[in-house]
Image (cartoon, rainbow, N blue to C red):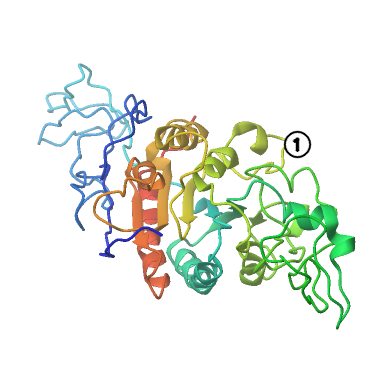
Amino acid sequence: MWPRSRPILLAFGLACGCTPRDGDTSPFTTTRPSTSGQTSTGTTDTSSSTSSSTNDTSGSGGGSKSTTELSTSSSGAVSSGQTTMLYDVGTDVDLGNPKPVGCKGKIDFLFVISRGAGMEYFQAQLLDAFPKFIDTIEAKFADFDYHIMVVDGGLEWGLSYCNDNCPSLTCKVGEDCCPTIPCPNCPNPINYGDLCCGIEDYPCGYTPSACDNTRGAGVVYPAGGDASNKLCKIDGGLRYMAKGQADLKSTFACVAQVGSSGSNRVGEVLAAAVYSNVNAPGGCNDGFLRDDALLMVTLISNTYDTNSKGTPGSWAASVLAAKHDDPESIVMFSILDAMPECHPADRTCPMVNMFPHHLRVDRDEPDYGTFFDQASDLVEVACADFVPPG
């Protein structure tokens, strides 16, 4: 854990609080300018990009209109002698309704959750806040159509030493036993009681599938210390929850309790989760990402990601590519650190700051619900400006 103070920062602009690492470039250098407001300067700014642009009334072509109204005859033709609209794009043709069609309540929620040691408390905080967040989203979008997927920051399913040695690691009450391979917690025989691999309810009898061991695939059977250690009941055999999911809040609680005996490679796993192959027909996450849906990414960790392959810029580029290079279609919400400037070891912070719609809060906040409410405001703003491709 890195020593630091814990001021709360609600940064909604397109600024990065630290200098990117050498060789790391932002993927946004060639994208269209954001129309979401002013950029943040690294301090709290409640008037920044969380407000949609309302100053442009000139039409989608960006031209200015004459203040004289256009008069037409009953047939729709322009009346003789009347003043017509003039545009600075060199045409007198009406450019149509400039209002974006919006996301129409279609939102793909991607939760990337660390499995590092000590995560059990922060996962509990997330599970407590999630129902409130869903209630808020449903209140703001009348026809709310969701996909919700959880991926964890680990590199494999469960614990490899348990998976390889489970039968020999099951002890009866009163017996002393120890793993047959080196174990830091077992220098001498210990009494596990009825625990398999020293973990209550560890699913020794479960054979993980190829997707269970695919980085970036949706979690359906969390396994390990402090995990739910059971197969979660997701409708349709999917690796994500869709609109109409039975008992949504309990199902989310099952998959989001990924435990605390794994890795913290949230940056690397985020990039893998949005990779086209894993979301393509026949892929592990088949159908999760939709072109006409907003993407909201929630990252939660209790330590800095120092081990992921790639860079903040490459992770951001992967997310951007998955959404057709449209930063307005993405909302980033990070629960880790809210310091005004990114800590040198915090590689997810500069990545999150690259997106115009983002929120960073401190992991030690006692209630994430308030901040999920603020994140829902970002979703509402982004949806208003979102123009689906095609």
Which of 1/107 is in front? 1
Vertical arrangement, residue 142 with respect to residue 287, above or below = below
Q: Residue furthest top?
A: 90
Q: Position of residue 176 (x, y in %)?
A: 84, 75
**From this viewpoint, is residue 136 visible?**
yes
Circle 1 residues within 10 Å: few <14, some 14–19, many ≥20: few
Q: Residue at x 62, y 55 (%)?
A: 262
Q: Position of residue 178 (x, y in %)?
A: 80, 66
Q: Is residue 128 left or right of residue 193?
A: left
Place residue 67 in its image quadrant. Answer: top left
Q: Residue at x 21, y 51 (%)?
A: 48
Q: Is residue 137 left or right of residue 87?
A: right
Could you tell me the amino acid type at mark 1? Gly
Tell me the SS state at disc 1. Answer: loop
**From this viewpoint, is residue 205 visible?**
no
Q: Position of residue 316 (x, y in %)?
A: 43, 37
Number of numbered callouts drawn: 1
Read off the residue under disc 1.
282
Which of 217/258 is in front? 258
Which of 304/88 is in front? 304
Q: Residue at x 63, y 61 (%)?
A: 258
Q: Residue furthest bottom?
A: 174
